[in-house]
Image (cartoon, grey):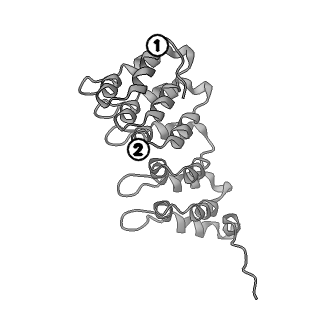
């Protein structure tokens, strides 16, 4: 009886240097009629193995080209990284996040808004992906705290923050994660965040009261009592 050969690792399928230019041309083609690349399609199927193969095809020596590949937009102006984060696929999201060797470029990407003035954080908060929220918040170091607060404060075209959207959709654990992103010495900014009004002049206290979210109301009153909120 023949032994079944082990499946090759994605790294084993990386091209040799002499074939690099051909592979780059192949991968960076415009995609199908919807401008989806092979990476977009692999993500849509949640196929982590194929994503690894495609990323390893470019490899470390062509880091800038790899970033360009990951950042290609389809006809909906959506990149593979944005789609992975939106759908909550943590494994593939981590693979794609590792492409960014320069922190500054990654932070700039996170800050990017779509036509509705929404960032990735808005999408993820609305859809309830706790693991992705943690990935995004942890992307900011202590030295980048001001940028993190700026990120949290961003409003969409309806003047909703990620906090509004998380609460609106009943994602209480995400609400706690967003509130706990503020340090003890940032109480004033935290209060400003909680007091933000949407286009209907409603704060998250309005949302929580309407939805009967007792735990959130307790958290908010603890906040104003200067107590530390915990998950």
Residue 44 lies in what quarter of the image? bottom left
Please say whether residue 105 is visible from this viewpoint. no
Q: Residues within 10 Å of mark 2 (few under 14, many from 20)?
A: some
Residue beneath disc 2: 127
Q: Name the residue rendered at 51%, 31% in the picture.
A: 177
**Are the residues tagged 2 and 1 within 8 Å (C-beta)?**
no
Q: Name the residue rendered at 46%, 13% in the picture.
A: 188
Q: Name the residue rendered at 51%, 39% in the picture.
A: 133
Q: Which residue is farthest bottom?
A: 1
Percent x, y of residue 120: 44, 41
Residue 157 lies in what quarter of the image? top left
Percent x, y of residue 23: 59, 68
* Above or below for 142 versus 75: above
State which tag comes first along the sequence, 2 or 1: 2
The Cα–Cα distance between marks 2 and 1, rounded to whole angstroms, is: 28 Å
Nearest the camera: 222 or 152? 222
Callout 2 secondary element:
helix
Residue beneath disc 1: 188
């Amino acid at each position: 009886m023949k032994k079944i050969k082990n499946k090759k690792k994605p790294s084993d399928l990386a091209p040799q240097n002499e074939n690099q230019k051909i592979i780059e041309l192949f991968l960076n083609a415009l995609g199908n009629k919807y401008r989806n690349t092979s990476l977009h399609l692999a993500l849509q199927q949640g196929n982590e193995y194929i994503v690894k193969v495609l990323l390893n095809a470019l490899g470390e020596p062509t880091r800038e080209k790899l970033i360009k590949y990951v950042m290609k937009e389809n006809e909906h102006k959506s990149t593979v990284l944005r789609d992975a984060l939106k759908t909550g696929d943590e494994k593939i999201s981590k693979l794609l996040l590792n492409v960014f060797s320069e922190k500054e470029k990654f932070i700039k990407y996170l800050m990017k808004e779509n036509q509705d003035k929404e960032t990735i954080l808005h999408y993820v908060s609305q859809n309830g992906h706790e693991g992705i929220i943690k990935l995004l918040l942890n992307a900011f170091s202590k030295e980048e705290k001001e940028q993190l607060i700026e990120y949290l404060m961003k409003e969409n075209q309806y003047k909703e923050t990620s906090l509004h959207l998380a609460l609106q959709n009943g994602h209480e654990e995400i609400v706690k994660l967003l509130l706990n992103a503020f340090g003890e010495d940032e109480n004033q900014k935290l209060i400003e965040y909680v007091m933000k009004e949407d286009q209907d002049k409603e704060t998250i206290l309005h949302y929580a009261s309407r939805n009967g979210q007792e735990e959130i109301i307790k958290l908010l009153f603890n906040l104003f009592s200067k107590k530390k909120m915990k998950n």
